[in-house]
């Protein structure tokens, strides 16, 4: 099936705004900062059981579960997966910032000027709730599907909490798909916030931590030392030159240009020749770039910086995701028929939305695209620019439009049994 405007209009008539808002407020109320995913998974289990999804949960790490489930269709239809992460970033500073206002509780789900506020509203509980509410909307309209609709909600996507944020949840899920325990889907929507745009391409990344070691010496006899801070100047100049070179050589229509951004530097601190300096950087990759090649290029630039004898340089990569060094870039063809149908459903549900754009972040779609061979895009209500901040919120009209668009897409992609 292709997109149908009359079907979208019919589905909108069956939306219960009170119910869908209560669903999202209930999700936000479940504090699920990375490491405490179980609190939200408990809530999702009840919601998924109510939708006859036969939810299954299993720990990807002790006390930290994933949850997944499916609704089997009548047959002869496509299988669609909605997937997202259950964890959120921290709330440090939230209550102090909003003290004495209705926004003070980061899990209160305050509704102000047509927006719902709180940690996780955009990243990405509005996306999860939109997907679940879309299936409820299909039921409200009395539609029966030919294909299967599957849901998977995984933990450990966010970074920032000690010992977490290495995509342990989706690694476990992907392993179960590859082992045949969970059926592979034909197409997936990862419900990261996009303001109802569709992202078929995303950047890749790696983080490098560079340790530059020389020899400390008393400031009065600097000739007895080897200045690590001076060496770091050469290394920084080499990194910035490398960044300019990779930015100049290519540009991706959706993702833009690559770069290497130095994010932190520290060293010295005594009245002496600095014996050690450390710096950190993040490298953005375009979809056509290879992560191993990008690491090799950076290392060549750093080791070719021309530092003096007696300096040693060590480089570590602490943020492995689907790759040991970081997160791979990914892209699927923007003209795939499911993507066309999805963009049309979004534009009809909320005029001006449904644009094709590139993800200015890294998330977990590469596990689906590269490891299990399932085409995937990012799409959901919510604005990534206010996520991870003290102003995280979601526009309620955008949230409702997302539900209608997802329901319309489910019907078009999975197919509807004709009465």
Image (cartoon, helix red, strand yellow):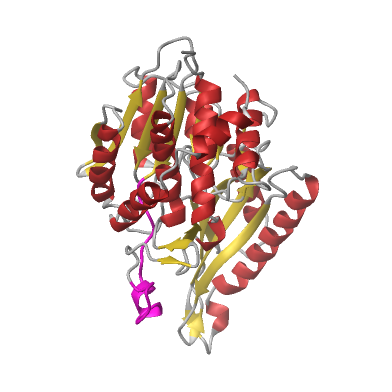
- Residue, far top: 76
- Residue shown at 72% from the left, 48% from the top: 256
Is 126 in front, or is 13?
13
Q: Position of residue 16 (x, y in %)?
A: 41, 45
Q: Position of residue 255 (x, y in %)?
A: 68, 46
Q: Quadrant of residue 137?
A: top left
- Residue shown at 39% from the left, 61% from the top: 119
Query: Which is the main secondary structure of the residues drawn in magenta?
Result: loop
Q: Can you say whether 354 is above or below 314 in the image?
A: above
Is 291 in front, or is 152?
152
99 magenta-colored: yes
Q: Can you say whether 215 is above or below 318 in the image?
A: below
Is 286 in front, or is 213?
286
Is 65 in front, or is 171?
65
317 magenta-colored: no
Q: Quadrant of residue 335?
A: top right
Q: Is residue 260 visible?
A: yes
- Residue shown at 39% from the left, 38% from the top: 132
Q: Can you say whether 378 is above or below 71 in the image?
A: below
Tell me which segment is drawn in magenta: 86-104
Q: Quadrant of the N terminus?
A: top right
Q: Is residue 318 visible?
A: no
- Residue, far bottom: 220
Q: Position of residue 307 (x, y in %)?
A: 64, 63
């Amino acid at each position: 099936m292709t997109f149908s405007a009359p079907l979208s209009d019919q589905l909108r008539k069956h939306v219960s705004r009170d119910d869908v808002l209560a669903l999202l407020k209930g999700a936000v109320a479940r504090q699920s900062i990375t490491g405490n995913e179980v609190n939200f998974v408990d809530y999702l289990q009840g919601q998924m059981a109510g939708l006859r999804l036969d939810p299954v949960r299993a720990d990807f790490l002790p006390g930290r579960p994933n949850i997944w489930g499916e609704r089997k269709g009548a047959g002869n239809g496509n299988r669609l997966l909605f997937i997202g992460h259950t964890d959120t970033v921290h709330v440090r500073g939230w209550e102090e910032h909003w003290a004495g206002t209705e926004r003070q509780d980061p899990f209160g789900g305050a509704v102000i000027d047509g927006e719902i506020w709180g940690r996780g509203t955009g990243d990405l509980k509005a996306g999860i709730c939109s997907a679940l509410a879309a299936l409820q909307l299909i039921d409200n309209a009395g539609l029966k599907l030919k294909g299967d609709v599957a849901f998977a909600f995984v933990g450990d996507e966010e970074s920032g909490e000690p010992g977490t944020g290495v995509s342990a949840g989706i690694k476990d899920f992907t392993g179960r798909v590859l082992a045949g325990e969970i059926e592979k889907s034909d197409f997936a929507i990862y419900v990261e916030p996009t303001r109802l745009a569709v992202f078929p391409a995303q950047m890749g990344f790696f983080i490098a931590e560079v340790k530059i070691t020389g020899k400390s010496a008393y400031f009065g006899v600097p000739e007895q030392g080897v200045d690590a801070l001076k060496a770091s100047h050469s290394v920084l100049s080499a990194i910035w030159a490398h960044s300019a070179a990779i930015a100049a050589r290519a540009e991706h229509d959706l993702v833009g240009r690559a770069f290497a951004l130095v994010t932190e530097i520290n060293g010295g601190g005594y009245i002496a020749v600095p014996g050690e300096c450390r710096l950190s950087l993040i490298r953005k990759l375009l979809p056509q770039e290879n992560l191993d090649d990008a690491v090799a290029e950076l290392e060549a630039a750093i080791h070719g910086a021309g530092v003096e004898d007696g300096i040693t340089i060590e480089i570590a990569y602490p943020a492995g995701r689907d790759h040991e060094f970081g997160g791979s870039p990914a892209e699927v063809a923007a003209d795939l028929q499911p993507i066309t149908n999805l963009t049309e459903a979004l534009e009809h549900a909320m005029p001006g939305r449904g644009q094709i754009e590139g993800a200015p972040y890294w998330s977990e779609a590469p596990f689906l695209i590269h490891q299990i061979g399932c085409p995937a895009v990012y799409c959901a209500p919510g604005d990534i620019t206010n996520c991870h901040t003290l102003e995280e919120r979601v526009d309620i009209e955008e949230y409702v439009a997302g539900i209608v668009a997802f329901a319309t897409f489910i019907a078009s992609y999975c197919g509807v049994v004709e009465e």
